[in-house]
Amino acid sequence: MDFIQHDTFPRHPFEYEGAMLKKDKQLEGLSVWMPVQFPEHRLQLDFYKKVILNEKKIDVPILQQISDAKQDTRMLMRTGTVTDSLEAKFDLDTFKIFSGLGYEIQLKEKKNQVLEEQEVKAQEQ
């Protein structure tokens, strides 16, 4: 599969997640955020996901809903796809930037949990 290393820069935003997955070297514990309306929009991402599974035996989850996101997860996402609901649920830390494509972020401790813990400590004092 030598051709995988020699393809061109993605031409359409639906190709960005696949391009980032192909370039990322730290695949353990990584997931991809790609909510789509039509499955055919995930063709490139699905292709690289299968290549990684076949060659490295790592199954990279593809998330489509905020409820699927878990704390302390590293996640690839296209530029402009961070949603208010994702930011409301987690503190986001940019881990890596893929120029012109998107980011690898880490989902930190849920904001609700931090606030609840602070409230409990305040009441105890």
Image (tube, rainbow, N blue to C red):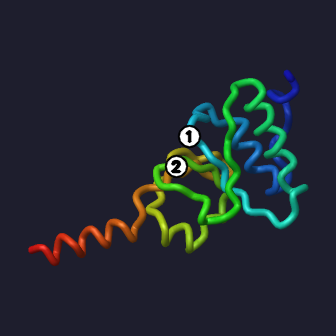
Residue 49's image quarter?
top right
Q: Is 121 placed left or right of 58 in the picture?
A: left
- Name the amino acid, label 2: Thr
Q: In this picture, is 1 found above or below 23?
A: above
Question: Considering depth in this image, is 117 or 93 the residue closer to the camera?
Answer: 117
Q: Residue at x 49, y 72 (%)?
A: 88
For label 1, the crowd category at 10 Å Cα-Cα, with few meaning under 14, some 14 to 19 and many 20 or more, is few
Quadrant housing residue 5: top right
Q: Residue, x 80% and y 36% (percent of image)?
A: 50
Name the residue at the top extreme. 2
The amino acid sitting under disc 1 is Gly
Drawn side of residue 37 relative to residue 68, left or right: right
Give the image location of residue 77, x and y in percent.
Answer: 65, 54
Please identify the quadrant where the C terminus is shown: bottom left
Q: Secondary structure at mark 1?
A: loop
- Determine the residue positioned at 79% across, 57% down: 13
Residue at the disc numbered 1: 29
Q: Is residue 11 above or below residue 51?
A: below
Q: Estimate the x, y position of residue 1 in percent, counting from the top left.
A: 86, 23
Q: Which residue is mark 2?
A: 73
Q: How many marks?
A: 2
Which of pointers 2 and 1 lies earlier in the amino acid sequence?
1
Dot 2: few (<14), some (14–19), or many (≥20) neighbours within 10 Å? some
> Of all residues shown, which one is farthest toward the right?
40
Measure how far apart labels 2 and 1 are at the Cα level.
7 Å
Q: Which mark is residue 116?
A: none
Q: Is residue 1 shown above or below 74?
A: above
Q: Are marks 2 and 1 in contact (CB under 8 Å)?
A: yes
Q: Nearer the viewer, residue 29 or 81?
A: 29
Q: Residue furthest bottom?
A: 123
Q: Quadrant of residue 67?
A: bottom right
Residue 76, x across and y down, in percent: 63, 49
